[in-house]
Image (spheres, grey):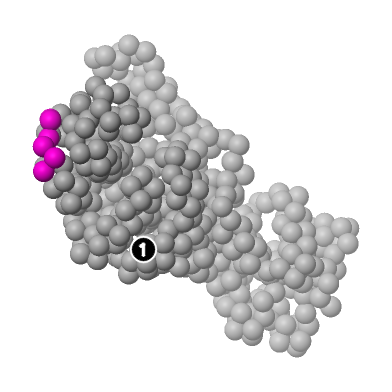
Amino acid sequence: MDKRTVFIADDDQGLQNFLFTFLSTRGYRVECFSSGEALLSRLWAGDRTGLILLDVVMPGCDGVEVIQKIRAMGSKVPVIMLSGLADIRTVVESVKFGASNFLMKPFDEYALENMIKEVFEQRATGESISSESAAETSDGREFLTKSPMMLRMAGIVRQVAFTDVPIMILGESGVGKEVMARFAHRHSGREDKPFVKINCAAIPHELLESELFGYERGAFTGAMNDKVGKFEQAHTGTLLLDEIGEMSAHLQSKLLHVLQDGTFSRLGGRKTVKVDVRIIAATNIKLDEAIAKGKFREDLYYRLNVVRIDLPSLRDRIEDIPQLCDHFIALYRERYNSSISSVPIPLLQSFAKYQWPGNIRQLENLVKRYLLLGNWEDIAKELYSGSLEVSEMTSADQSLGSLLEVGAAAADHAERQLVYRVLGETKGNRKKAARQLNVSYKALLNKIKRWNADQPSLAVIQANVASGF
């Protein structure tokens, strides 16, 4: 009694009758149970089913307890949780215990039908829900990962993406929080709607409010025209609040209000604006510590932290490094006119031993540098000595959190090394160096002047090349 059989456990008799009729007319064999204990009794008796629809809130044994006991029996039967909005935290817990998916009440019957059809199609081809998620999240369009931890996080995001509950993504700088946010957007049912991102740390506090909520003409000096804020731009879509831990207390209060009822007023405006926006928040700071210090509102934290995703650092997923390197080489090789097609094994071994304080973004910059300079031995030495970590982290600190500045500093560093290497090869002949670098002679002189090295002697050039400057 497995093929196209659906067990339904729900204490709502009206919903039972509806689901029984709806699914029976579509060719499914349906059995209904009014309690979790009754369902478990049938499973313990050895009866099999192809799918279970399980209510979260039931008298006696609730849905989370039921799914735990089902998995303790060794059963891998797919389970779709049925939940009211107030039970969303419990649903997330059930996903962690092995629920395949869930639907919010009241749900669209055709969404349910498609979900059930997908389950039986996957069972027919010998695939499980979890393996399907892993396959989708490991291809080049989604995630470049083989990490079980990363795949588990992606699986949770995919399962909750179609709901409207907020997602909180935590992790160090450079681990891929925006990538995960875009992944959630693609699977949310809003994928053809706007995806809007704002970095709360990169915009001064006094300007962030107008960026988020917009303003009316005359709201302040210089406000010559109305401006639409990020919330209105993201209407019907997704808004990523990156580095939300840096948001001021005043804005945290206003954001809490928007999350509660979906309305706000522009600066200087009198009318209320209502928006339908899915919120994803991301930060690299420890919010529990920020709450303890009074820097982040506890009520806002709980409002945002319905679904929490903790992304692992690159040092905790070193199995992904070779694949990421191949990806970055393919991405930048043509742009930098490089003949390099792969990262040498010794350098990959150095990458595997490194701690990666800058995570994937730091790896990307090193691959760019390797494509430009072809100096894998120098990179390996710097990784081993720790000098790379010091220089990169110092530039990151000086950037005050601006990713654009960090990227620009890394690019400038690589460009400087290339220029001095070519000057060394041409024995200080700047005209030859300019031709070899495919830049104008004047542009080369301006760069050298900017680096405080106007008309450098050959000895200075060679010293700079030797030091990796």
Question: Picture coordinates of residue 412 (x, y %)?
Answer: 26, 39
Comparing 444 with 247, the one in front is 444
Quickly name the residue at label 1.
Answer: 347
What residue is drawn where x is 70% and y is 63%?
12
Determine if residue 440 is in view: yes
Q: Which quarter shows the N terminus?
A: bottom right
Q: Residue furthest bottom?
A: 45
Chain part drawn in magenta:
454-459
Question: Picture coordinates of residue 323 (x, y %)?
Answer: 49, 59
Instruction: Look at the picture and state if 223 lies above or below 14.
Output: above
Comparing 377 with 352, the one in front is 377
Question: Picture coordinates of residue 247 (x, y %)?
Answer: 28, 42
Instruction: Look at the picture and state if 57 lies above or below 241.
Output: below
What residue is drawn where x is 59% and y is 41%?
191
Does 399 sit left or right of 130 as displayed?
left
Question: Picture coordinates of residue 166 (x, y %)?
Answer: 47, 50
